[in-house]
Amino acid sequence: MKPLSWISIACALSLSLLMVLPTSAQQRFQRWGGGVDDEQLHFGFSFHYINADYKITLTRDWQAPFQAPNGNQIADSLYSVSSPIYHGVGLGLLADVKISENANIRFTPALVFSNKTVNYGYTPYTNNSNHDRQLTALVRASYIDLPLLFKFKSDRKGNYRGYLIGGGKYSINVVSSKRYDDTGFAPVEKFLKTKPGYFSYEAGIGFDLYFDFFKMAPEIKWVQSIGNLLDAREPNMYNHPIERMMLRNFQISLFFE
């Protein structure tokens, strides 16, 4: 074979390798993610860390002492009512329905443990006391969250893509009613009670990270309740200065799909 023919064959092989190698390298480093993006329906699980507090609206006469049904004054005047940030955790499941390449509907039920407190500051009982009195009402809360969310995704870039998520949810407090039974308790031992269920809306941002056999998604969300959570059917010294309570959550989640 002529030398020119060998040179032609070598050049052709070199060009072929140059065209194949980048594709092979891309396939090698492109994570598959278990193929969840190609499925019409897929499942997963999640972990949640929650910071929560109450947004409190006070009544016009919130500083006035509470009067018991028998007419006795239970506490002196209030000077502050506040809800500090409380921490909680949650575990959840995931069902994801693919609408298009850039949109999904997600149902993410979770069991969330997130007690909260409300602090009350009272002026001294007597003129001989120079110390203010602080009382704390604990709100016990273990919720089953039932969110229905829309996920809007960017195009995939390598092994990640960003997304926005938003929607609404209904939450049910599953704490036993026996733990809220304060019949016969002294006024200072009564409970601050919230309604057993409420609606809320939530919105957030996250990133899909692709690995060989699964996809992981860290996510940050803001959650705001709708309506008044306060259960004031039985007036006591803790709920009488409050007109309205709303729950606010800042939630960090980690999804595995």
Image: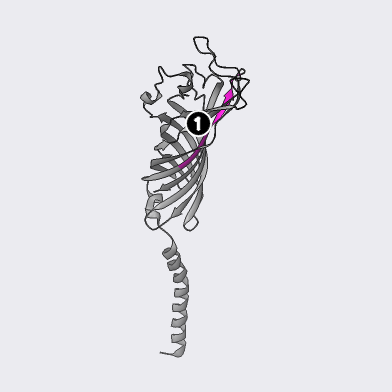
Question: x%, y% of residue 35?
Answer: 38, 53
Rendering quarter of residue 172 = top left
Front-most of 173 and 226?
173
Extreme-front residue of the structure: 128
Q: Is residue 204 magenta?
A: no
* Residue with the most extreme top position: 70
Question: To which quarter of the image does residue 3 belong?
Answer: bottom left
Tell which of 85 and 150 is nearer to you: 85
- Give the residue number, with chain letter if any, for mark 1: 117
The three-letter code of the residue at mark 1 reads Thr
The residue sitting at 55% across, 19% down in the picture is 75
Residue 82: name its quadrant: top right
Report x, y in % for residue 115.
Answer: 45, 33
The image shows residue 208, relative to residue 59, as above or below, that is: below
Magenta: main secondary structure equals: strand
- The span shown in magenta is 49-59
Residue 188 position, x and y percent, is 48, 21
Q: Is residue 50 magenta?
A: yes
Residue toward you, 6 or 69? 69
Q: Residue at x 55, y 23 (%)?
A: 244
